[in-house]
Image (cartoon, helix red, strand yellow):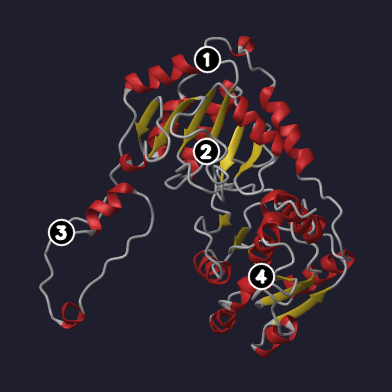
Amino acid sequence: MRFTPRRRDGLGPVVLSLPEDVLSEACDAVAGAPAYQRVAASPSVAQIERLRQLLEGAQRPMVIAGGSGWTPEACADFRRFVENWQLPVGLAFRFQDTLDNEHPNYAGDVGLGINPALAKRIHDADLLLALGPRLGEATTNGYTLLDIPKTKQTLVHVHQGADELGRVYAADLPIVSGMPELAAMLAAMKPASADKLPWRGAADEAHRAYLDWRKPRQIPGDVQMGEVIQQLRAHLPDDAILTNGAGNYATWLHRHFSYRHYRSQLAPTSGAMGYGVPAAIAAKSLYPQRTVVALAGDGCFMMSAQELATAMQYDLHVLFIVVNNGHFGTIRMHQERHYPGRVHGTGLTNPDFAAFARSFGAHGETVERTEDFLPALQRAMEAKRAAVIEIRMPQEASTPGATLEQIREQGRKLRGEA
């Protein structure tokens, strides 16, 4: 049956397509058929020993962790490993909950809008441990972060699926393994002398650079989104679940929100818009005692906004934060970068999102200044039902690091028009 081999890979959801006549026909149940059991490979002793040798011979090692298949126990083992070896850790695109972001070894997220200091640290590393991630387009910043097909760094690539290894990057040490199996063996592997590691202090330095990077920068308008995200973090439980879809608005979440708890980040690595709303509803259904917040852009929210009806029907107290800047921000950014001033099909005519929420019976708030956010958040949390907070921002506030006009000017320079 096709379900079984796909599940063995542990790579994610499985779609099983059945003809309509098969679905409507009666069939016999097989008595005593065993339930599905997880099957995963483990690193060999020789592979772990080789990894140790590479670490002991390194001067500037770096870890990129993430991907699927982690468990709370595996994350704890992974944390012990990076602590024992004092390794700086970057987390792959939208796998920022693999390690507590306040941990002194955390160096930041490796993805779109990467901290240039972190990108340089990865570039300058002599040993790169990729533990779990695919090393796909987003994590490698459009395949520009690492050389193809052979990285200049010695590359150890561990993944659950053998087909992923060598797909783009030829690893010096490829390992097929489940994450719990890998992490347990790494946690047991300790350096001969932690005080004599050549890179001692590198993790602290990388974490300080991350803390500086996540400080909010001034952006156009009366709402400073970086401050809003940090206020949100300060007023949520550590295990709160954050969901988002795709769009420039999510870069504020990636850069300024601190993920403290495993399975607190739900976000698509495929660039799928509209994901955050249904993901938040599903998360609240599974974990009714946990706080669940969905962050969405205006375009992203409108692709699944009707699911507010589901949240109300099942009394799911999800908080939806809608960043309304009146356009498809990511597409507009690329239009301005590649064809400055030629804008087509990206403007939006939006509803009053707070009134839209109230039409479903949900709580609705509108925020037009930074100082309005915390009172609105408090009222939304006290409403004891699904709530929408609309944050109105100017189109110029395109990303945490560049305005729309700056992006337009970059495009003109690239085209020789400046």
Task: Judge the density around disc 2: few (<14), some (14-19), many (≥20) Cα neighbours within 10 Å.
Answer: many
Q: Name the residue furthest bottom.
A: 359
Q: Amino acid at mark 2?
A: Ala
Disc on the earlier residue, 2 or 1: 2
Which residue position is annotated with label 2? 65
- Between residue 292 and residue 165, name the one nearer to us: 165
The alpha-carbon separation of the residues under discs 3 and 2 comes to 37 Å
Residue 61 placement (x, y as % from top left): 57, 23
- Between residue 414 and residue 166, name the one nearer to us: 414
Disc on the earlier residue, 2 or 4: 2
Q: Residue at x 13, y 80 (%)?
A: 26
Q: Residue at x 63, y 63 (%)?
A: 247
Residue 116 placement (x, y as % from top left): 70, 38
Which residue position is annotated with label 1? 191
Q: Secondary structure at mark 1?
A: loop
Q: Number of numbered discs present?
A: 4
Residue 28 drawn above or below residue 260: below
Q: Secondary structure at mark 4?
A: loop
Q: Amino acid at mark 3?
A: Ala
Q: Nearer the viewer, mark 3 or mark 4?
A: 4
Q: Amino acid at mark 4?
A: Phe
**In the visual, does 338 lie left or right of 380?**
left
Q: Is residue 106 visible?
A: no
Q: Amino acid at mark 1?
A: Pro
The alpha-carbon separation of the residues under discs 3 and 1 comes to 46 Å
Q: Nearer the viewer, mark 2 or mark 1?
A: 2
Q: Nearer the viewer, mark 3 or mark 2?
A: 2
Please give the label number shown on residue 328. Answer: 4
The alpha-carbon separation of the residues under discs 2 and 1 comes to 20 Å
Which residue position is annotated with label 3? 33
**In the visual, does 98 lie left or right of 156?**
right
Whether pointer 2 and pointer 1 mark residues with C-beta atoms closer than 8 Å, the reply is no
